[in-house]
Amino acid sequence: MAVTHGALRTTYLPVRPAVDRGRQVGAGTLIGTVETTWQHCAVTCLHWGLIRGSLYLDPLRLVRPNVRLLPYWTPTPRPRSQPSAPPRSVASPGMDLRAYATTAGGGALAGMVLAFLLSLGWRYGRSRPSMRRPPPGVIDLARERRQRRAR
């Protein structure tokens, strides 16, 4: 789900919309309900993004600097009288790859940094052919050149 605020757009995933696409809403209006999903998080979660044009921004810019986090409560099981209806496909805003890109967090960055550091360690950690001594009786021409230049 996406909400446009002038030049900015906020995205919310996974949310079942409670309003029709294109409808103007005011502050405090219920726009949707967070859906439970089994695909990426063990518990119900909300992924919140902020976009200006095609540039992704930090959504925490929209809140005051002093954020108050609530404690984690264990969820109480709710009795289900009937299964929930599938999301409406007509009124739901279309999701594209950019909407899913907002869900990438620090884990993706940490993985890239780890892969980079491991590749550097692998590359510079192994012995290089130029560092090995040649077999007895073989003249190392590169070493001879370096010694001649140093004189």
Image (spheres, rainbow, N blue to C red):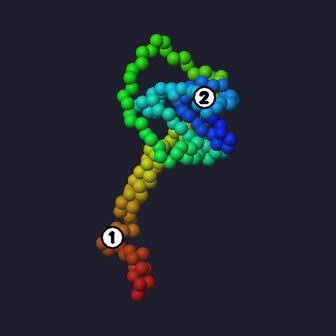
Give the x, y percent position of residue 81.
46, 12
- Reply above or below: 39 against 86: below
Give the x, y percent position of residue 95.
61, 32
Which quadrant: the C terminus? bottom left
Residue 20 relative to residue 145: left or right: right
Front one among 8 and 151: 8
Q: Using a 10 Å C-alpha cutoff, classify the residue at mark 2 as few (fewer than 14 neighbours), some (14 to 19) or many (20 or more).
A: few
Residue at image point 36% right, 28% down: 74
Residue at image point 54% right, 26% down: 33
- Reply above or below: 22 against 106: above
Give the x, y percent position of residue 101.
55, 40
- Asked if residue 108 shows in the view, the reply is no
Q: Say which quarter of the image contains residue 29.
A: top right
Q: Identify the disc placed on residue 133.
A: 1
Residue 25 relative to residue 16: left or right: right
Could you say whether the residue bearing mark 1 is in a helix, strand or loop? loop
Give the x, y percent position of residue 13.
54, 33
Q: Using a 10 Å C-alpha cutoff, classify the residue at mark 1 as few (fewer than 14 neighbours), some (14 to 19) or many (20 or more).
A: few
Residue 109 relative to residue 7: left or right: left
Q: CA distance from mark 2 to mark 1?
A: 75 Å
Residue 76 relative to residue 37: left or right: left
Q: Say which quarter of the image contains residue 52.
A: top right
Which quadrant: the N terminus? top right
Residue located beneath label 2 in the image = 29
Q: Closer to the N terminus: mark 2 or mark 1?
A: 2
Front one among 79 and 139: 79
Q: Residue extending furthest top?
A: 81
Could you say whether the residue bearing mark 2 is in a helix, strand or loop? loop
Q: Looking at the picture, which amino acid does disc 2 mark?
A: Thr
In the image, which is nearer the foreground, mark 2 or mark 1?
2
Front one among 144 and 46: 46
Q: Looking at the picture, which amino acid does disc 1 mark?
A: Arg
